[in-house]
Image: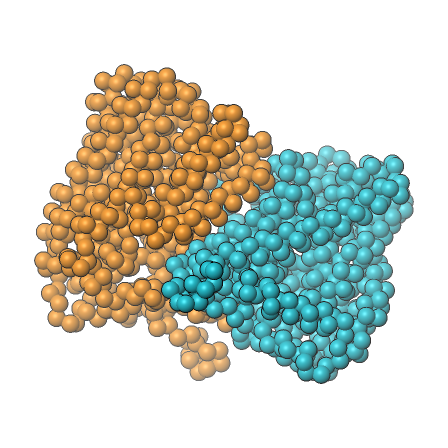
Chain colours: A cyan, B orange
Amino acid sequence: MALNSSSVVMKLALFSSPDTASVDSITLFVLLLCACVLIGHLLEKSRWMTESVVAIIIGLFTGTIILMTTKGRSSHILVFDEELFFIYLLPPIIFNAGFQVKKKQFFRNFLAIILYGVVGSLISFLIVSLGSLQLFKSLDLDLMGLGDYFALGAVFSATDSVCTLQVLNQEETPLLYSLVFGEGVVNDATSVVLFNAIQKFDLSHITSANVLQFIGNFFYLFLASTFLGVVVGLLSAYVIKKLYIGRHSTDREIALMILMAYMSYMLAELLDLSGILTVFFCGIVMSHYTWHNVTENSRITSRHAFATFSFVSEIFIFLYVGMDALDMEKWKYASDSPWTLFGACGILLCLVLLGRAAFVFPLSFIANLFRKSKADKIAFKQQVVIWWAGLMRGAVSIALAYNKFTRKGHTQLQGNAIMITSTITVVLLTNVVGGLLTKPLIRSLLDPHKNGGDSVASDSFSSKTLPLLANGQGSESNIDTGNPIDSSQVVHHYWRRFDDSFMRPMFGGRGFVPVVPGSPEEGSSLH
Amino acid sequence: MALNSSSVVMKLALFSSPDTASVDSITLFVLLLCACVLIGHLLEKSRWMTESVVAIIIGLFTGTIILMTTKGRSSHILVFDEELFFIYLLPPIIFNAGFQVKKKQFFRNFLAIILYGVVGSLISFLIVSLGSLQLFKSLDLDLMGLGDYFALGAVFSATDSVCTLQVLNQEETPLLYSLVFGEGVVNDATSVVLFNAIQKFDLSHITSANVLQFIGNFFYLFLASTFLGVVVGLLSAYVIKKLYIGRHSTDREIALMILMAYMSYMLAELLDLSGILTVFFCGIVMSHYTWHNVTENSRITSRHAFATFSFVSEIFIFLYVGMDALDMEKWKYASDSPWTLFGACGILLCLVLLGRAAFVFPLSFIANLFRKSKADKIAFKQQVVIWWAGLMRGAVSIALAYNKFTRKGHTQLQGNAIMITSTITVVLLTNVVGGLLTKPLIRSLLDPHKNGGDSVASDSFSSKTLPLLANGQGSESNIDTGNPIDSSQVVHHYWRRFDDSFMRPMFGGRGFVPVVPGSPEEGSSLH
């Protein structure tokens, strides 16, 4: 995502001004977080609500109360700041996603994920940018220039991987989860990279050299970020294996895992790379190697602690989005021209729907060409779910929109105010509608009892009762069981051989047995 | 501790000015934290070093390098801010202490702990205040007034419970650990309450009514803070037991425990109570009830996650103290009169030594009067260890000194600069000397093989291999085994009866068996 390190004003939004934030706002926020956790738990049985919708509604409700008690002056207790989001809330969510993702599924679908995440985001970006450039003229909107439209394209091509986690279930629909969520992570990176590139790009001189440089830059970012994440992950595995820290202290192991994961993200930011990609791959490597080198207690603790961090960060974001949606300042400027706002929202929603359709179906067709077995192909019904589940826009969009269209959370220009309020409206609508309808949609389209394509049965190694062990355990050997072999399985076969003969002896991983101090083995391993 | 909610400028020190702090300072700090964890692990076998000394030394070393690269302009990458300390770093440390403390030991020694923590702190406070008032005259120090001397007394009567945790071992010397650590927590609260009271107190009109009001205020704070912590802890137990959240999600249980613990601290701050006391008792109640109501995975995770938070916060504090010790600004003002500084440090060190001796030995004598059995009495050698181990001054002293003698981390007055530099010097000296000598001192004075007074043997229910289960497990029934019964055991007996017949049915706790949904029991419990 490449936040420029010098431009980053590392001020926690919570604390940016002494009068708006104090002990009471933190207390209130913690109280609301508790309420979200509890109400989310109580509503879990109703298959319609998700935690994010609950948090948004509680946020809206609290915002209304604050608005009334402050007599319309303010609706939120904290000032939104994209640094709070990018430095503190996003890393745990993305790291946990990498840590808990089913690696086998992810890498098996790697081609499709990259297609959706990179090519798809570019298509969506172009459609939203060019579409809004054409259609906003009819609304008399005075955006500043070409850059604003392209920024809008980047803002609305960022699907929200956080929301996806809420509506898709890794156990029930592993293929869809892996595709939509994988796309979400890659796409987060793509859109932030696009957004930053556009900010620097000289749009008045588009030459082929510029475009080539842009593409080269993009691939450099992508590969360098991935590489950094893998290196830090392997380093953590090596250090923990070599020092066998768990002998003395589980806490030290967990502290080291957390600190090194966070360091990978911060290092990526420091080097102007995409921290999201880095920390995602760091999470994957840590769950493949490091996690197996620690004590049993550390394994349980790390799984659940990372999941908890991520869970609380997600609720925090949605709670805030709900509260901030009522911010009067933006609505005041925007409400002078309600029809423009209404039109802008409508246009953007249509463009988002269209932009996503324009890449999901064609790219699925291309991805299917590489999938040999019929059971493996992405069915049309599944494509519809992929299209729908990825429509949600979330905190990344909000953060980017704030970055582009406000100064420190405030805006004076009517055009910018309309952009902010449209973004908030689109995020709220896609989240509430998407959050309410996705689960029923999946059930009606892909009932596991009717349709064997992507059901629990196809994921026989998953275990609901023991999710800790489900990750990549078992079924590792189905390369030998006479299934039709396609290219991804061949790659996987060679990877397994490399992993077993070189990586695991070096970095530990599944089946790692710590060297008992003083045993002959330790002596020999030192020579 | 009663930070005034309106006066709290909730600005994270890390982020208080855009030029000094950025992505690179966070990255560097995370890197240093990793280094501390690793070096601490490697040096653990050497029984001399503690993690805190390692962190201080790494901090000093890094400070020197930063000082050289910035050509003497600055030695630290973060600006110390007492809010960062009181709002984010202290709560996890104290909560974890309450959560992991051996409750039986703590309550058995409750009288002695209160004597040391309240009466002892007052004695120490008076000796340091009045002693410095007398002795500083000879140094030509121009402190502002009587209030400054009393503030100094409060600053130096705050023993550091965090350091204590590093040098005393709960398993090896349970009695000493419980006494010194318990004193540390109560004493933290006492000194912060004293400090705040002095800030508001009109020292020119000391009347008996004022003094009575002061004492009444103190007891109110003490009891109200404890009560609040107990209530929030019980609430968390009740909610988790009633909703049986673990059925759906371990993460939700842990999130709820963390959020409610933090909420207890923030609520106490909001109500101008002592957050330290509140969160400590909240931790005790949570470990007695809530912890038993959650799933097995949540139990393991919560134990280790809380310990890890606490561990990282501690290292963070010491790393920072080391780095900040080299801050040039303070030394520049102080170095104009090196002999004054030298004298002030010497006087303060002597007063701290004397102030602690003046209460440990007399109060131990009083405490022993209430201890019937000979094996139970606090032996003279143990009193020496209590005196020595509590000499360390730490982050609480630094935070209070910064609060009183600087404005936003800067000072212009020579007297204030000397107070700050003396505080830093005393903290460094007591930590390094105390950290290095305490373990050898304990070994020479209280060798468990020579002396049965306070050894592993006397704590038969502790289990090093399974510390999770050691807490309060077993030996609960020794009231019935014919040991000589003293008053604390009678209290304990009645408490057990009350706990079993009223508290546990209501709030769960050890042996809690969740109601299986749909079973007849659930139906009856609803009526």
The residue closer to the viewer here, A240 or B139, is A240
Residue B469 vertical placement versus B427 (above, below): below
Closer to us: A310 or B38: B38
Quadrant of the rendering where the C terminus of chain B is positioned: bottom left
Query: Does the rendering let one see residue B506?
Result: no
> Of A230 and B9, which appears nearest the observer?
A230
Seen as rendered, the residue at the extreme front is A527
Callout count = 0
| Residue positioned 52% across, 54% down in the render | A258
Residue A521 position within the rendered picture, expressed as x and y whole percent measured from the top left = 44, 67
Residue A374 shown left or right of residue A245 in the figure = right
Q: Is residue B90 above or below residue A452?
A: above
Q: Toward the viewer: B185 or A275? A: A275
Rendered view: B454 above or below A336? below
Q: Residue B286, how many percent across, how many down?
A: 37, 60
Residue at image position (59%, 76%) is A474
Q: Say which residue appears at 57% left-offset and 57% top-offset.
A: A234
Q: Where is residue B96 in the image (x, y as percent from the top left)?
A: 38, 54
User: Horizontal placement of A311 versus B237: left or right?
Assistant: right
Q: Position of residue B309 (x, y in %)?
A: 44, 52
Q: Residue at x 72, y 52 (%)?
A: A222
Quadrant, the N terminus of chain B: top left
Say if residue A7 shows up in the picture.
yes
Q: Is residue A114 left or right of residue B511?
A: right
